[in-house]
Image (cartoon, rainbow, N blue to C red):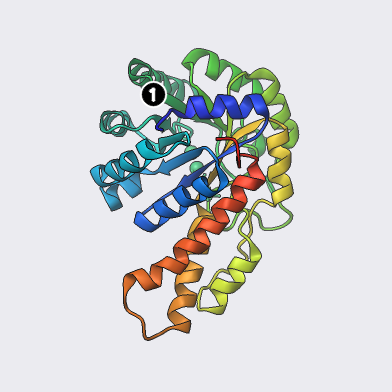
């Protein structure tokens, strides 16, 4: 059944587990996360970015998700990931999304509040939940204390932000970043900061940039021609700790892309005679599904639906 992120995340928060928001980009990646959720009996947040909307088409995505989600006994939400403006938000709400993120993290504090409030007003009318972001996703190694304070989420500012905007969930910056190159040296997150934020806020917290960049997948990709030197992610024990300190939603894109494309490379290398797209993409879909299932177990959302 189709529900909002708020519904999924409040029950995750109360029971101290997290739910993955998995980014899709085409039919096969959509199928991979849906099959994983069914096999793990996990609630599912389907994350779609503005660039995926551009790539796959809004109506195609919505029809696909609606048709599938309505028949599923599990709670499923269709979530806009990193919405940047009111127009995109309006378009997604109108099309049937049940949750939207407005990412004003690049704006000044007051501007971020103003933009987020506007989105909350629009969304509340329709019963749609809203996620906002405060702080910038940037690695924290090799930064000065001043730089850290400028980028990472300030707990007191977060409290004021949530009070004034009435958002349903907040993405916080504690040292993660998007993509496959998160840390040059030892992976490090600011857990003290997370603890302080959690103490001040009563809403679900979100961790973006949470891919672990598994080295076996990097090696497989490189074996078949990729050039992913120095790729590094957030270790699984850091993810477990972040959940124990109050993270309820975890965004994963990079690990899915890596699993999918490493397997496409492998399939083409091993079977150079094939040219049926289904034969090329189904092993990739399977590999991605296995990664999603492992995340659901790591996050504790398996058997929670
Ligand atoms: C993410 C995904 N999407 O919004 O935050 O982060 O690049 O670590 O998968 P990764
Ligand atoms: Ca951002
Ligand atoms: Zn993100």
Neighbour tally class for label 1: few under 14, some 14-19, many 20 plus, Cα within 10 Å: many
Q: On the picture, is 112 further left or further right than 150?
A: left
Q: Which percent across, then down, holds residue 91?
A: 26, 32
Q: On the picture, is 72 further left or further right than 58?
A: right
Out of 276 and 122, give the one closest to the viewer.
276
Q: Determine which quarter of the picture holds residue 18.
A: top right
Residue under the image location 64 percent in, 24 percent down: 14
Residue under the image location 49 percent in, 25 percent down: 6
Out of 122 and 136, give the one closest to the viewer.
122
- Give the mark count: 1
Is the residue 146 above or below the residue 143 in the image? above
Residue 72 seen in the figure: yes
What quarter of the picture does the C terminus occupy? top right
Is the residue 148 above or below the residue 284 in the image? above
Is the residue 111 above or below the residue 83 in the image? above
User: Could you say whether the residue bearing mark 1 is in a helix, strand or loop?
Assistant: loop
Q: Which percent across, then down, holds residue 249?
A: 57, 36
Q: Is mark 1 within 8 Å of ligand 1?
A: no
Residue under the image location 52 percent in, 37 percent down: 43
Q: Which percent across, then down, holds residue 302?
A: 61, 42
Q: Which residue is mark 1?
A: 128
Residue 154 seen in the figure: no
Q: Which percent across, then down, holds residue 191?
A: 73, 36
Is the residue 57 above or below the residue 214 in the image? above
What quarter of the picture does the N terminus occupy? top left
Which residue sits furthest bottom? Answer: 273
Out of 279 and 226, give the one closest to the viewer.
279
Q: On the picture, is 118 further left or further right than 233?
A: left
Residue under the image location 58 percent in, 73 percent down: 220
């Amino acid at each position: 059944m189709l529900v909002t992120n708020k519904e999924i995340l409040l029950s995750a928060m109360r029971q101290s587990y997290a739910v993955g928001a998995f980014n899709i980009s085409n039919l096969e990646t959509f199928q991979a996360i849906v099959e994983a959720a069914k096999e793990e009996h996990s609630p599912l947040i389907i994350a779609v970015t503005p660039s995926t909307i551009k790539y796959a088409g809004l109506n195609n995505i919505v029809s696909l998700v609606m048709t599938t989600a309505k028949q599923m006994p599990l709670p499923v939400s269709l979530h806009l990931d990193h919405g940047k403006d009111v127009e995109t938000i309006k378009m997604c709400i109108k099309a049937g999304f049940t949750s939207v993120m407005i990412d004003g993290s690049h704006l000044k504090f007051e501007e971020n509040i103003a933009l987020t409030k506007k989105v909350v007003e629009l969304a509340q009318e329709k019963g749609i939940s809203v996620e906002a972001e405060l702080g910038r996703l940037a690695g924290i190694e090799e930064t000065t204390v001043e730089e850290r304070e400028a980028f990472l989420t300030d707990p007191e500012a977060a409290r004021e932000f949530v009070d004034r905007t009435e958002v349903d969930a907040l993405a916080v910056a504690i040292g993660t970043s998007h993509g496959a190159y998160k840390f040059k040296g030892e992976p490090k997150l600011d857990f003290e900061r997370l603890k302080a934020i959690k103490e001040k806020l009563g809403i679900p917290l979100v961790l973006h940039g949470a891919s672990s960049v598994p080295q076996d997948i990097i090696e497989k990709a490189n074996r078949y021609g990729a050039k992913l030197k120095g790729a590094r992610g957030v270790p699984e024990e850091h993810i477990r700790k972040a959940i124990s300190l109050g993270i309820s939603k975890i965004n994963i894109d990079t690990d899915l892309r890596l699993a999918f494309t490493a397997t496409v490379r492998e399939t083409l290398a091993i079977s150079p005679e094939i040219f049926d797209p289904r034969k090329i993409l189904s092993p990739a879909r399977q590999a991605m599904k296995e990664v999603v299932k492992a995340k659901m177990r790591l996050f504790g959302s398996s058997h929670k639906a």
